[in-house]
Image (spheres, rainbow, N blue to C red):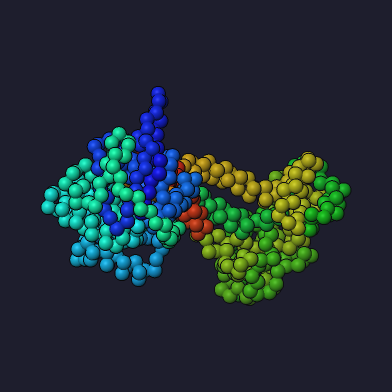
């Protein structure tokens, strides 16, 4: 028995208020069908929403077998609708794109039953309404009468105490209407409270009782013979798995729109990936080149004026500085030619040597002999060069060659000097043991290694200076202090160059460019997030009825919000995946296109960028979807169901 005690429902307007229900007291017996009869506007739907637990903004009490609803407890209303109320609407409210079976299952999901039980319940209820053959047919293919049977099955499947049918036959022809009515009336025998709202006297006459309402007042009520009874009230529980399934279904239903939007939104993600990665390739390449040719811990200090050599006190200061590993006197030279007087072969082959760095002795890959020691006037040369002088490079070890060279100083003369070859080395290796020559430049990082004594001699011969210290190389123990040491030397009025300075400047430049590009990327992502938000909002508006229906079936606000938010995050995810794929393909193309020009991959996307892009895309979906999801969750089911 469902009883309504002294219920008053008031609508408030700007200039006044109206009592749509006025002190309504009415009883609906179980095991009987009651027709709620009244003219249009008399308050039937309003009363129905209250007894159906869709509306809790009223005064008075609604009680089921003596258990009254607590208006403060919204969760109680959710479980009331889920467990006790089965709604049947005039216009069915089916999920048109889903199968009959899915539509019926929808009414059962929040009860979180085992799959087996769900299946058997759906099957038996479909048999009850005579639709067992149609279980896998899409709802939109059914006739009106069949649709209403599906709706009845959906209401019935959770075995509620009350069946509330709002003008259930209003949209049906008279023959079908009679069958549907008969079906509804048949539930009395299970002890259910059957309530049929109608303004049709013929239908009302077929019910056990007629409750008459007019102008919000009850004119006639069935007898109240309430007997308290214990009922089971399960809290709605809509599993994550089911909500995921529903989300996927919804996304698929609007697949074209979602695909187009993901495509557009992915532009933001693509630009973000590409802008952050564009230049990483170039930067890596530059870094590698610098590391290969220069020692980042090295600071070269030279005097700009030969009459003012670098002061010994400053050098001592540096030597005592704890950041400094060593200070070396440098005698930089320019070596241009090496000639070997090979009488046995009957000639004097000469090689030209490009002016390259000599400071990587620690990375030398010596093949024959040794590297020259400081005090001997000697040098080691690279194998390829040695081969230009003799057929077998090994035999050159210990032989004397003639060198054409000069000091690095501006006024140095070009001189010829004899020196011994102490060793032959092969392709230099970097720290990882890779050949430097892996790059597209066919450069040999180092072509020769000269001894300090040889350099000193060349400078002495070419400039006449031997004692003055014009250049020092300072090696710091770490990369970072190199810049500070260079600054220190500059303060003293010397010229000082730290490789770290150069690398730092290049990095700053790249960082600057990246910040600008990344900001643009983020703006596009923001715009994409707004787009997702707008599309989700449109989706909420389109699906308002569906939201109302789900609330009527006992789904909580949280369940509704979760579905919309999940869809939005899923769209974000798809956007991210599309973005990653397109960005990767583009980078591939760009790199192939530019490789011949620059000789390295200008776009290098680290895998972390893809992970970051996916995360950002999903966050974008989350942020874009949050407001629409809240709007969806907060929709008043009564208003939502009325929305046309
Ligand atoms: P019935 O179902 O019998 O046709 P309703 O319960 O729908 O009647 O409506 C009863 C009265 O309440 C009507 O006068 C209607 O205009 C009014 N009403 C219904 N909903 C609202 C609302 N949200 N705001 C203001 N008035 C409303």
Asked if 639 appears above or below 103 in the picture, the reply is: above
Asked if 495 appears above or below 122 in the picture, the reply is: above
Of the pair 373 and 515, the residue shown nearer to us: 515
Q: In the picture, residue 291 is in which quadrant? A: bottom right
Of the pair 615 and 176, the residue shown nearer to us: 176
Instruction: Give the residue displayed 37% in from the left and 32% down from the top.
Output: 19
Q: Is residue 65 visible?
A: yes
Work out which quarter of the rendered image holds the C terminus and state it: top left
Q: Position of residue 149 (x, y in %)?
A: 22, 57
Q: Is residue 616 left or right of residue 354?
A: left
Asked if 78 appears above or below 493 in the picture, the reply is: below
Work out which quarter of the rendered image holds the N terminus and state it: bottom left
Q: Position of residue 5 (x, y in %)?
A: 40, 44
Of the pair 618 and 145, the residue shown nearer to us: 145
Q: Is residue 293 left or right of residue 239?
A: right
Q: Is residue 348 visible?
A: no
Q: Position of residue 8 (x, y in %)?
A: 40, 37
Residue at the extreme left of the image, as rendered:
175
Q: Is residue 493 left or right of residue 562?
A: right
Q: Is residue 251 left or right of residue 139?
A: right
Instruction: Give the residue displayed 84% in from the left and 47% down from the top.
Output: 314
Instruction: Give the residue displayed 40% in from the left and 41% down from the top.
Output: 6
Q: Position of residue 185 (x, y in %)?
A: 23, 56
């Amino acid at each position: 028995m469902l009883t309504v005690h002294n219920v008053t429902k008031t609508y408030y307007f700007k200039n006044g208020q109206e009592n749509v229900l006025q002190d309504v007291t009415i009883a609906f017996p179980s095991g009987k069908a009651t027709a709620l009869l009244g003219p249009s506007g008399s308050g039937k739907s309003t009363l129905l929403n209250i007894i159906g637990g869709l509306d809790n903004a009223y005064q008075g009490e609604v009680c089921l077998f003596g258990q009254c609803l607590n208006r403060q407890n919204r969760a109680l209303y959710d479980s009331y609708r889920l467990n006790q109320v089965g709604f049947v609407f005039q216009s069915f409210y089916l999920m048109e794109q889903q199968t009959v079976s899915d539509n019926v299952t929808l009414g059962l999901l929040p009860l979180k039953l085992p799959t087996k039980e769900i299946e058997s319940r759906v099957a038996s209820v479909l048999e009850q309404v005579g639709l067992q053959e149609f279980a896998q047919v899409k709802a939109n293919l059914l006739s009106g009468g069949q649709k209403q049977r599906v709706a009845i099955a959906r209401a019935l499947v959770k075995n509620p105490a009350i069946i509330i049918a709002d003008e259930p036959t209003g949209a049906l022809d008279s023959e079908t209407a009679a069958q549907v009515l008969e079906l509804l009336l048949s539930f009395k025998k299970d002890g259910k409270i059957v309530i049929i709202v109608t303004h049709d006297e013929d239908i009302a006459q077929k019910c056990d009782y007629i409750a008459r309402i007019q102008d919000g007042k009850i004119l006639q009520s069935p007898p109240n013979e309430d007997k308290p009874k214990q009922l089971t009230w399960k809290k709605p529980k809509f599993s994550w798995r089911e909500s995921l399934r529903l989300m996927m279904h919804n996304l698929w239903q609007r697949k074209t729109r979602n695909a187009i939007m993901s495509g557009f939104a992915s532009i933001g993600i693509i630009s973000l990936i590409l802008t952050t990665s564009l230049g990483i390739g170039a930067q890596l390449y530059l870094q590698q080149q610098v590391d290969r040719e220069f020692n980042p811990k090295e600071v070269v200090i030279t005097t700009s004026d030969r009459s003012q050599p670098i002061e010994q006190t400053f050098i001592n200061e540096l030597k005592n500085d704890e950041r400094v590993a060593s200070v070396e006197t440098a005698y930089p030279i320019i070596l241009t030619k090496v000639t070997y007087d090979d009488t046995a072969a009957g000639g004097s082959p000469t090689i030209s040597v490009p002016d390259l760095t000599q400071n990587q002795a620690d990375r030398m890959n010596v093949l024959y002999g040794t590297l020259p020691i400081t005090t001997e006037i000697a040098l080691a040369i690279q194998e390829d060069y040695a081969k230009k002088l003799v057929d077998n490079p090994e035999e050159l070890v210990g032989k004397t060659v003639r060198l054409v060279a000069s000091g690095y100083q501006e006024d140095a003369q070009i001189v010829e000097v004899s020196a011994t070859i102490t060793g032959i080395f092969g392709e230099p290796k970097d720290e990882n043991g890779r050949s430097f020559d892996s790059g597209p430049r066919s450069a040999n990082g180092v072509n020769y290694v000269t001894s300090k004594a040889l350099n000193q001699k060349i400078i002495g011969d070419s400039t006449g200076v031997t004692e003055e210290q014009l250049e020092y190389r300072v090696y710091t123990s770490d990369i970072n202090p190199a810049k500070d040491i260079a600054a220190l030397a500059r303060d003293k009025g010397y010229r000082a160059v730290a490789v770290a300075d150069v690398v730092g400047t290049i990095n700053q430049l790249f960082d600057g460019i990246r910040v600008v590009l990344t900001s643009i990327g983020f703006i596009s992502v923001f715009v994409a997030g707004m787009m997702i938000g707008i599309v989700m909002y449109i989706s909420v508006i389109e699906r308002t009825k569906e939201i109302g229906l789900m609330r009527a079936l006992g789904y909580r606000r949280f369940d509704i919000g979760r579905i919309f938010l999940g869809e939005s995050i899923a769209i974000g995810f798809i956007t991210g995946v599309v973005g990653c794929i397109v960005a990767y393909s583009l980078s591939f193309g760009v790199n192939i296109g530019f490789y011949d020009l620059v000789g390295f991959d200008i776009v290098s996307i680290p895998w972390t960028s893809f992970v970051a892009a996916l995360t950002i895309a999903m966050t974008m979906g989350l942020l874009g979807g949050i407001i629409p999801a809240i709007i969806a969750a907060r929709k008043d089911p009564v208003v939502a169901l009325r929305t046309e």
